[in-house]
Image (tube, rainbow, N blue to C red):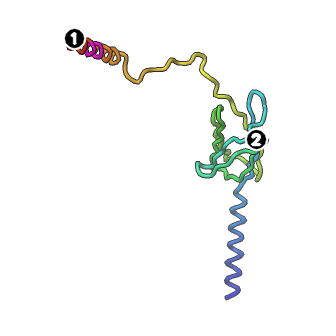
Amino acid sequence: MVFVILLLNLSFMSAQQQERAKLILFQGVVMDAASLEPLPNTHFILNKAVGNVTDEKGEFSLYIEKDDTIKFSHVGYRDFIYTPSDTLRGNAFTAGILFFSKGLPEKPEPPRPMIPQKDIERMKELYRERINKDMLNR
């Protein structure tokens, strides 16, 4: 009986080792593309499930598999999505992630009314008619 339990335990450890062998240590730094300054507190999400933020130096470190997807986001910057290549070899990978500013449109768009202009004009007309009618009835 003890022999069987020992064999099961050894086969389980072997499966854990195989699982670890699939993992890649993915680490790097997130920077502003224009200034190359690190971006602390950049949010990243692994496979739309597990999230974290970069440290005060913009650095991050996590274990990934080759078919994972990591989305990086920071206020004022375009999101960046990274999927490791299936040709990636080894058990560690270091990257520099450059974030580009979203920027502002050159000419801001004027605010648009929620009610179409023709309806606004019609409402004004009805209001004037009502006011005139009320004034005549006094």
Regarding mark 2 in the picture, which secondary structure is present there? loop
Tell me the quarter of the image containing the N terminus: bottom right
Residue drawn at x 49%, y 20% is 111
Residue drawn at x 77%, y 36% is 38
List the single residue furthest toward the bottom: 1
Residue 12 percent across, percent down from the top left: 68, 72
User: Could you classify mark 1 by the number of other residues whose Cα lies within 10 Å: few (under 14), some (14-19), or many (20 or more)?
Assistant: few
User: Identity of the amino acid at label 1?
Assistant: Leu
Q: In which quarter of the image is residue 30?
A: top right
Q: Which is in the foreground here, disc 2 or disc 1?
A: 1
Residue 68 percent across, percent down from the top left: 63, 49
Q: Considering the whole magenta stretch, tell me its main secondary structure.
A: helix
Residue 124 percent across, percent down from the top left: 32, 15
In the displayed structure, 126 sits above or below 52; it is above
In the displayed structure, 115 sits above or below 16; it is above
In the displayed structure, 108 sits above or below 78; it is above
Residue 62 percent across, percent down from the top left: 72, 51
User: Could you classify mark 2 by the number of other residues whose Cα lies within 10 Å: few (under 14), some (14-19), or many (20 or more)?
Assistant: many
Instruction: Based on the picture, tell me whether residue 39 belongs to the magenta stretch.
Output: no
User: Identity of the amino acid at label 2?
Assistant: Gly
List the single residue furthest toward the left: 137
Residue drawn at x 76%, y 41% is 58
Tell me the tag on residue 77.
Answer: none
Highlighted range, magenta: 126-131
In the displayed structure, 117 sits above or below 83; it is above
Q: Distance between the residues labelled 2 and 1?
A: 72 Å
Please tell me which of labels 2 and 1 falls first in the chain: 2
Residue under numbered circle 1: 136
Tell me the quarter of the image containing the C terminus: top left
Tell me the tag on residue 58.
Answer: 2
Residue drawn at x 69%, y 46% is 53
